[in-house]
Image: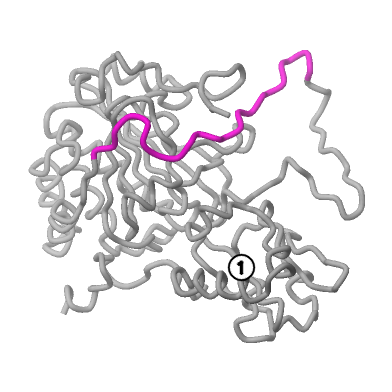
Amino acid sequence: MSSGTEANTPPVAQDSAAGRSSTEVREEAKSVEFTYRGIYQKTLAANLCKHVVMAARKRDWLGSTIQRYGDSPERNGVPAKQFAVIAPDEMRLQEHMAKYEPNELDVITVLDDTLCDGVESWAFYGRQPINLRLRRGGTLLVISNRSAEELLKVIPRKPWDWTLAILPGTPSLGGLWVYRDDGTDMRVLGAIARTRPDIFEFSAVESVVNEDEKLGEEHLAALRDGYEEVVIHEVAAGVGKEDDYEPVRLPGYKEMREGIIVEARKLGERNPDYKTSSDRTMRPVVNFDTCIKCRQCWLDCPDECFDITEEGFHPVNYDYCTGCGICAQVCPVEDCIVMVNDLEFIEEGNEDVFPMWKEDKEAYHRWREEKIANGRIEHHDYFNADTWAWSGGKQADRTS
């Protein structure tokens, strides 16, 4: 089912396939969105928005920023958004800043590629396509070591042409509340300058970096690295995943009940409104043959996503799994529970894999080993915490 313009769904871009594209709208306000993981990349997103605005000032445009998802502090890993809006004059800037959020985005930057399969950054909207508000001809910039073909398996198609830009790299841990500079912001800014010079040109952001006494040659090197390494793919209309996101129907004021009400659930029943799989960057994969049925995963899971079968095994209900990795840490059996990058499960989605094991154990183990080989994540080392987040694991070579 399409998540287009049904009643009570979030507003979508007004440009039609016959309307003006992102690059054709040159003298109006432009909006750049940064979609990130709460806490982990908060300061990173804020830093990027600041530099977009400062680079725009180099051509005498004005700018400001908006943040969405306001938990304080933001819950770890929850998808969040921050926008930079730039305009040629104060009137047009104020007009766009008065909106709750931009409806038409010229650039969407995804700082963690596992967010490409949809985000639910404020719950009552439900899970949305990552490119829902992308303007015709707009650019989706993703930090990823995956190919365009892989990413387009989870990014919904659009009825017009658009651009997918991929900046090789892994998610950064640099953007915590206490900022740890790893160069990711500079690389992303360089990539934006390469793919969208109508937002700002490379010379403009280079000038901003040069004028900042806190930044040095390593930052300029990272800026050039992003500019040179970003790979640009033109995506034709109709190419990508089928848009099967369910639109969310919000109740009208006559349907609302008095007060704040959370429906009580029966013992052992989960709340269907509290599905949290969009928070996940990785997921646990269980080896039921080595499981000793100790129930440690079931006891320690903070989201109660482990079921108990008649045989005493503990399959994962992936609709409610946030991918925190606690189960893998507390499991006493080595590699009984392994954390795997969530994008390895494009075909499976959130389906229960326990019936697969019951039906054909050998086939299940082949499937499991393939997933682990392609996407195993050592939980503590998931985010790239190396100094200077160059692509391809070349940090030591590039900084020696």
Residue at 52%, 73% in the rendered image: 379
Residue nearest the observer in this picture, 42 or 303: 303
Say left or right for 264 vs 149.
Answer: right
In the rendered image, residue 274, in percent from the top left (x then y), is placed at: 71, 45
Say left or right for 341 vs 253.
Answer: left
Image quadrant holding the C terminus, namely bottom left
In the rendered image, residue 231, in percent from the top left (x then y), is placed at: 21, 50
Residue 199 sits in which quadrant? Answer: top left
Q: Which residues are magenta?
A: 234-255
Residue nearest the observer in this picture, 338 or 76: 338
Local secondary structure at mark 1: strand
Residue at 60%, 16% in the rendered image: 7
Query: Is residue 236 inside the magenta stretch?
Result: yes
Amino acid at circle 1: Pro
Residue that numbered label 1 is attached to: 284
Residue at 29%, 29% in the rendered image: 161
Residue at 53%, 53% in the rendered image: 347
Q: Height in image: 235 above or below 288?
A: above
> Outermost residue, right direction?
267
Instruction: Give the prevailing secondary structure in the magenta stretch.
Output: loop
Say left or right for 234 vs 286.
Answer: left
